[in-house]
């Protein structure tokens, strides 16, 4: 079955940087659009970056210019490079394959990002 394993989360100070990784298995990775989401307890999951199978990227205004999504099809891995982190970026981050912007697989365990001084 399709599985995602997210990693790279940590406690970081405001203004700092992190790179998250998501390793996918059980799917033909290269043919799917991929997305990174985040969730704060008690709130809905929020889409923060997408990369199509043709490497086109999209970001919401809240992270544009600070987050960069990329993919390595040889490693079945999608990355999220985050810089200029703010306390409001604190959340659990997840990846998923997407279709028309919506997630289409079960979620992994996510990786916790905490931005705090």
Image (spheres, rainbow, N blue to C red):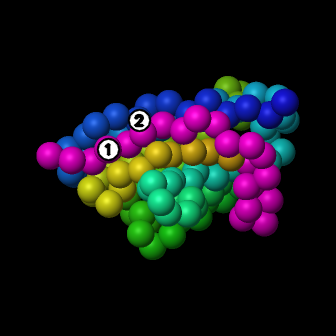
Looking at the image, residue 11 sits to the left or right of residue 57; the answer is left
Apparent side of residue 71 relative to residue 10 in the rendered image (left or right): right
Q: Name, please, the residue furthest toward the front.
A: 42
Q: Residue at x 64, y 37 (%)?
A: 108
Q: Which mark is residue 89?
A: none
The spot of residue 1 in percent (x, y) is 84, 30
Judging depth in this view, the residue of 99 and 42 nearest the camera is: 42
Residue designated by label 1: 114
- Magenta stretch: includes residue 29: no
Disc number placed over residue 9 in the picture, else none = 2
Q: Is residue 53 shown to the viewer in this render?
A: no
Range of residues picked out in magenta: 97-117
Residue 33 in the image: x percent, y percent?
A: 74, 52
Residue placed at 73% from the left, 62% from the top?
A: 102
How many numbered discs? 2
Residue 69 in picture, x, y percent from top left: 54, 50
Residue under the point 51% across and 53% down: 38
Residue 90 lies, with reference to residue 2, above or below; the image says below
Q: Secondary structure at mark 1?
A: strand
């Amino acid at each position: 079955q399709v599985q995602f394993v997210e990693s790279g989360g940590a406690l970081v100070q405001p203004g700092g940087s992190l790179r998250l990784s998501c390793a996918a298995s059980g799917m033909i990775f290269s043919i799917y659009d991929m997305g990174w989401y985040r969730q704060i307890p008690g709130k809905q999951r929020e889409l923060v970056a997408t990369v199509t199978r043709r490497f086109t990227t999209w970001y919401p205004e809240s992270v544009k210019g600070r987050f960069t999504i990329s993919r390595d099809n040889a490693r079945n891995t999608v990355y999220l490079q985050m810089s200029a982190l703010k306390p409001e970026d604190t959340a659990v981050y997840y990846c998923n394959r997407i279709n028309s912007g919506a997630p289409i697989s079960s979620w992994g365990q996510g990786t916790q990002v905490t931005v705090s001084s």
